[in-house]
Amino acid sequence: MRPCILVLDAHYLPSALTRSFMAVAISWRSRTSPRVPVPSLQHAVAPTSVSPSRLDFRLFACGKLSGGICRGTAQAQSVPAPVSFRLMSAVPCRAARFPTPRHCLSASYACRAADRDGVAVEQSTEVEGHSSTSPSNGDLLRSPALERNDFARENVGGIHVIIGPMFAGKTTALLQRIREEADAGRRVSLVKSDKDNRYAVSAVVSHDGVQMPCVAVPTLASFREHVGEEAYKQMEVIGIDESQFFDDLLEFCQGAADLDNKTVIVAGLDGDFLRRRFGSALDLIPLADSVTKLHARCELCNQPAPFTFRKTVDTETEVIGGADVYMPVCRHHFVSGQIAVETARSVLQVHQESRRSALSVAKEVTA
Ligand SMILES: Nc1ncnc2c1ncn2[C@@H]1O[C@H](COP(=O)(O)OP(=O)(O)O)[C@@H](O)[C@H]1O
Ligand SMILES: Cc1cn([C@H]2C[C@H](O)[C@@H](COP(=O)(O)O)O2)c(=O)[nH]c1=O
């Protein structure tokens, strides 16, 4: 019985195979046990409509080899075409280091950890009935072909966008994602606009006071300069808060995800106090892997609140503030609030105009 991480690779995939085939295909032979099913196959289900040209599917399973059964949960990433699996390696590891499948999010992480712990790849075999071009046992981790074609691909980047009004929990969600990624062993970094100095200068802070240190910069290009190229290269996950204030958001995220293989998690407002697009979070949507719109609670009726209402008479787009200046509102209260604001504004305008003309009359009379 030996704690293992199984790294399964699924390249060279015939595209016509079905989900059910996948389920039976994912099994493997070892020297000690005849056939070991990988559990929780529902996690490894590929979409039914797939492009045969995108043959990149990965399945990572964490579990213990015990009595011929692999216990644990499979994790799938980047799920295009099904499916013929070839077991690339069974990497012995210290199970305690990987207590949950979450810790097996990345095969290279597992392999790097195994490498760090000085454990060699123990076994390489293939799923019955499918040809394999695997290198011989023991060489898998260091195979240049593998690094180039397989493990390098696992490090593929991504863009995840979290939008919504103020107080919706965007910062909370971002901090949670970053913490999860850090717990999974990925190198994370957090950046926010230096315009946001409400709660702290060098920390991302939620309205609840949950916080995490960050780099505060005027532009994302300057973030890269600030941390330096070597540190940037090392980063695997970059969290961006207050994205509405970054003019170079689109350019940075595209480069980071497409070219530099970073996972970028972006949190920011989608709309301003008049529900106009704010910044360029919306431009990221066609490039994004996931988009989440969060709602707050309407301060006037406690219904879901997708909009932000400004309580002051400022008219410029950018006004830094919290609950003193803004409140989240539902559609009904946004619309009625705007009507009230517009009415008050026009009453004020009429009042100011009549005051101005009264003053000029008074000036003429006294002249
Ligand atoms: N009207 C409201 N609706 C929802 N949450 C609110 C409201 N007012 C204050 N909060 C608090 O704000 C927290 C969310 O803060 P945060 O994650 O910083 O939001 P965001 O980044 O979207 O502005 C909530 O957990 C809640 O405690
Ligand atoms: C609606 C709106 C907001 N802002 C500012 C106010 C705050 O400083 C941030 C949003 O912070 P949060 O983390 O989402 O609570 O943006 C603005 O400048 N203009 C606006 O219209």
Image (cartoon, grey):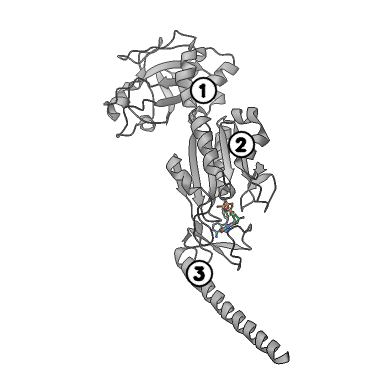
**Label 3 CA crowd tier, 10 Å (few <14, some 14–19, many 20+):** some
- Mark with earlier residue (3, 1): 1
Q: Which mark is residue 338?
A: 3
Residue at the spot 63% in from the left edge and 29% down from the top edge: 229
Ligand 1 contact, mark 1 (Cβ < 8 Å): no
- Mark with earlier residue (2, 3): 2
Q: Looking at the image, is 122 positioned above or below residue 58?
A: above
Q: Looking at the image, is 301 positioned above or below residue 89?
A: below
Q: Is residue 6 visible?
A: no
Ligand 1 contact, mark 2 (Cβ < 8 Å): no
Q: Is residue 206 visible?
A: yes
Label 2: which secondary element: strand
Label 1: which secondary element: helix
Q: Which residue is mark 1?
A: 108
Q: Which residue is mark 2?
A: 189
Closer-to-camera residue (235/330): 235
